Amino acid sequence: MNQEILLKEINRKKNNMTEEVIYRQETQDDFQEVFELNNKAFGQDNEAKIVSALRDNPNVFIPELSIVATKNKKIIGHILFTKINIQDDNKNFHESLGLAPMAVLPEFQKSGIGGKLIRYGLETAKQLDYQSVIVLGHEHYYPKFGFEPAEKWNIKAPFDVPSNVFMAIELVKYGLKNISGTVIYPKEFETV
Ligand SMILES: CC(C)(COP(=O)(O)OP(=O)(O)OC[C@H]1O[C@@H](n2cnc3c(N)ncnc32)[C@H](O)[C@@H]1OP(=O)(O)O)[C@@H](O)C(=O)NCCC(=O)NCCS
């Protein structure tokens, strides 16, 4: 390889490494890559299938809240927020959002991409006028983004989980005021 070609090659590699990560709404062209990403991140295709099933349910799927992180046009992360309900003791339903699942390709993990996907998602949800988000997840991770144990609002999971891993965030002040009860997830979460 002559020196000019070598320099071009080095620059190309450097650009690839420094290429910024772009966060944007998922499009139909991304579906297959998002499936493979979830498959790789979770080491099984259950979550990938749940994402596909949720997309097919217009009652819960919000296209703007299926978000991908891309680098050099390759999808390296994905996060999904879907509509969920909180059912109170009087059997009234209150709409909220559930954050699940989220995934970052193993080789890109622990560099902040997951965190940026969460922040991008929360901001988009707020712009779309959603009031709150519920998550079941790591108790030291989600509080970084403002999540607090859902028991603060007397909101419970529909299954047995330690209270510190079941969390909620208000996207607007008083977004969960006077809302308590049990979360009802879309049935698609039980399909696999
Ligand atoms: C969870 C996940 C999306 C985080 O993405 P990421 O880009 O690595 O996240 P960030 O770089 O913003 O943060 C990394 C931190 O999250 C922590 N974390 C978040 N969720 C975690 C989980 N479910 N298990 C273990 N650690 C988790 C890591 O320990 C790490 O902590 P540290 O920074 O103190 O070392 C990624 O690890 C992943 O795809 N995991 C496999 C799929 C999964 O378990 N998804 C979550 C359940 S839906």
Image (spheres, helix red, strand yellow):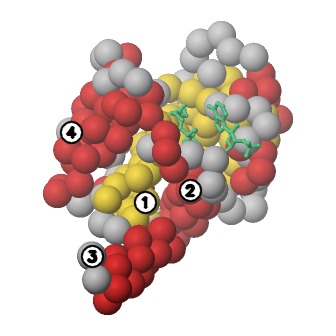
Q: Amino acid at mark 1?
A: Ala
Q: Which residue is mark 4?
A: 56
Whole-percent x, y for residue 35 in the image:
27, 38
Q: Quadrant of the C terminus?
A: top left
Q: Secondary structure at mark 2?
A: helix
**What residue would you read off at disc 2?**
113
Q: In terms of depth relative to the viewer, which is nearer, 116 or 100?
A: 116
| Disc nearer the start of the sequence (4/3) | 3
Which residue corresponds to mark 1? Answer: 69
- Per the image, label 1 sits on a secondary structure element best described as strand
**Crowd class of label 3 (few under 14; some 14 to 19; many from 20; radius 10 Å):** few
Q: Which residue is painted at 31% across and 24% down in the image? A: 45
Of callouts 1 and 3, the N-terminal one: 3
Q: Do the residues under discs 1 and 3 have CB atoms within 8 angstroms? A: no
Label 1 CA crowd tier, 10 Å (few <14, some 14–19, many 20+) = many
Amino acid beneath label 2: Ile
Q: Is mark 2 within 8 Å of ligand 1?
A: yes
The residues bearing labels 2 and 3 have C-alpha atoms spaced at a distance of: 36 Å
Number of numbered labels in the structure image: 4
Q: Residue at 61% across / 36% down in the picture? A: 135
Residue extending farthest to the left is: 29
> Can the viewer see residue 6 in this picture?
yes
Asked if the residues shown at circle 2 and circle 1 are in contact, with their CB atoms under 8 angstroms apart, the answer is yes
Q: Position of residue 147 (x, y in %)?
A: 74, 45
- Of residue 142 and residue 36, the one placed in the foreground of this image is 36
